Image (cartoon, rainbow, N blue to C red):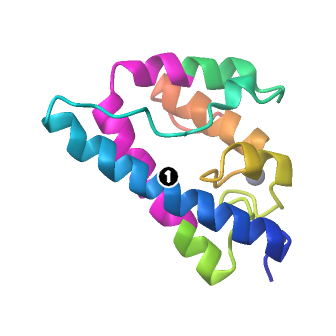
């Protein structure tokens, strides 16, 4: 059973489909040299959450890898949509806890809770394995 309400699920599904289309348009538009408005990928840094630092780091990092980032986002959107269908959406893939709705609304593609994301980013940032 999904830990989020059907209403929120519906809303997020719509946003994900929209984001999917935007990303496709951006990825294809890029080669024409006619980039459209950037897709509405809500940056977490401005959503009033208290994980600003890692999100901001991630954003500046992504500036250099926008094309790669868009493909990653598209994959994340697809993954989120399939989790919505399977009923796994809203559950942290790392620890299995319920992801807070506010976090899902801010970033519909998240797959992890905040502590897990911070841990994963630390691991990826250092290129070393888990610290535990
Ligand atoms: Zn977690």
Vertical order, 17 against 108 (above or below): below
Farthest residue toward the left?
A: 32
Local packing at callout 1 (Cα closer than 10 Å; few below 14, some 14-19, many 20+) is many
* Front residue of 87 and 13: 13
* Front residue of 131 and 124: 124
Residue at x 79%, y 65% (from the top left corner): 8
Q: Quadrant of the N terminus?
A: bottom right
For residue 38, what is the image quadrant?
top left
Image coordinates for residue 79, horizontal then vertical, percent: 50, 64
Image coordinates for residue 81, horizontal then vertical, percent: 55, 69
Q: Is residue 47 left or right of residue 18?
A: right
Image coordinates for residue 116, horizontal then vertical, percent: 71, 44
Q: Is residue 100 visible?
A: no
Does the stretch in magenta take in 108?
no
Residue at x 81%, y 76% (from the top left corner): 6
**Residue that mark 1 sits on:** 19
Residue at x 31%, y 48% (from the top left corner): 25
SS type, badge 1:
helix
Segment tinted magenta in the rendering: 58-80
Does the stretch in magenta take in 59?
yes
């Amino acid at each position: 059973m999904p830990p989020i309400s059907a209403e929120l699920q519906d809303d997020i599904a719509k946003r994900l489909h929209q984001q999917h289309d935007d990303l496709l348009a951006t990825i294809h538009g890029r080669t024409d040299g006619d980039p459209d408005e950037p897709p509405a990928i809500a940056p977490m840094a401005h959503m009033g959450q208290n994980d600003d630092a890692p999100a901001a780091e991630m954003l500046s990092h992504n500036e250099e890898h926008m094309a790669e980032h868009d493909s990653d986002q598209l994959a994340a959107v697809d993954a989120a949509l399939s989790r919505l269908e399977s009923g796994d959406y809203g559950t942290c893939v790392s620890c299995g806890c319920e992801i807070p709705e506010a976090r899902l609304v801010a970033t519909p593609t998240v797959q992890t809770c905040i502590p897990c994301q911070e841990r994963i980013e630390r691991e990826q940032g250092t290129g070393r394995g888990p610290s535990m």
